Image (cartoon, helix red, strand yellow):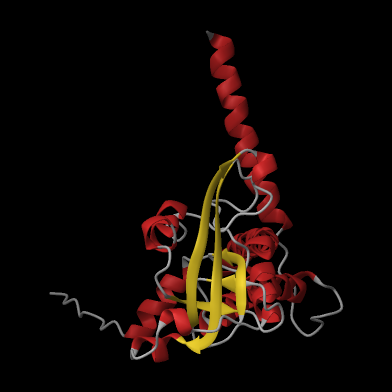
Amino acid sequence: MSTCEDTPLTLGGVVKKLMVNVDVEGLKVKTKFYTSLCCGTTAILSVFAFLFLIPFVVDPAISTILADYEDRPVTCVAVEHIYAEGLSNCSWSSCREGCTNAPLRCHLIYVNYTKLLFEEWQKGGIDLESLEWDVGETKFYINTEGCGYPPRVNCSEFAKKYGFSNMGKPFPCYYSKTYPDMVVARYSWDDNLKYLILSLVIPNVLFAVSIGILIYWYCPGCNRSRTPIDTSSYVESFHSKNDDEDEEEYEDESEY
């Protein structure tokens, strides 16, 4: 009588058996092909993202830095609010929803401001009529560009908050040290710097990493020590497979 002895399988033996059935070189070629495709797409999208961020984030952030606003809010009072319509009457606007379109309707708010800190005013004991205004009847903007996009910028709410029935009531504002006639309602040095750094770093880092990987793989003089992986065979088989499918579809249609 013959007996069958079970041969114990070790982890190494299982791995070796699996590796025999796996086309390692083919897997490398496929990985390189799809990774290259992903890197190329990322590089292109990074360029478009950076070009998009320049007018909407980078340029306003740089303008805000150059304006050099007072870090702590001072005291402002709205003295005039005009609602106008038409291009000729809207040469400027305190608030505009959309920074690229021409304003057809606009809110024009003029303010007086004093360099007295708003927190000092809130403590009380200061008569509004006795205040000496440092700048009078100057243009008031929601931010440096005077525009933005919903929901962050809502011009109707902005007009209700600072104009109409709230005229004559003190509120916090920020004046520019570079351009003293420029006053804004919103300013944060930390947020402005954060958005500027993110808009500059993220697209450029993604572009540099993607291009670096592609150069490392495909530049003949950059990687002499490694054995190059030829992806042309996979690309050709990829195209031939699609061509075969197209031919089969064409033959099926011709039969009908």
Instruction: Decide if residue 160 is on the left or right side of residue 78.
Output: left
Residue 202 seen in the figure: no
Q: Residue farthest to the right?
A: 221
Residue at 33 percent of width and 84 percent of height: 11
Instruction: Decide which of 89, 5 is in the foreground and name it.
Output: 89
Q: Could you tell me if residue 92 is visible in this image?
A: yes
List x then y, in percent, for residue 246. Answer: 61, 29
Give the quarter of the image for residue 95.
bottom right
Q: Name the quadrant of the N terminus.
A: bottom left
As rendered, which of 218 and 128 lies closer to the eye? 128
What x and y, as percent, mark residue 219? Answer: 82, 72
- Residue at the farthest top position: 256
Q: Which of 10/212 is in front?
A: 212
Which residue in the rendered view is the most extreme toward the left? 1
Image vertical order of residue 208 relative to residue 119, above or below: above
Q: Write the residue at 21% across / 79% down.
A: 6
* Residue at 65% over, 34% down: 243
Residue shown at 37%/81% (left/top)?
Answer: 13
Q: Residue furthest front?
A: 130
Residue 142 position, x and y percent, is 53, 65
112 versus 42 height, above or below: below
Number of numbered discs visible in the structure rendering: 0
**Residue 203 versus residue 246 in the image, above or below:** below
Left or right, residue 214 beside residue 82: right
Q: Is residue 124 above or below residue 4?
A: below
* Quarter occupied by residue 111: bottom right
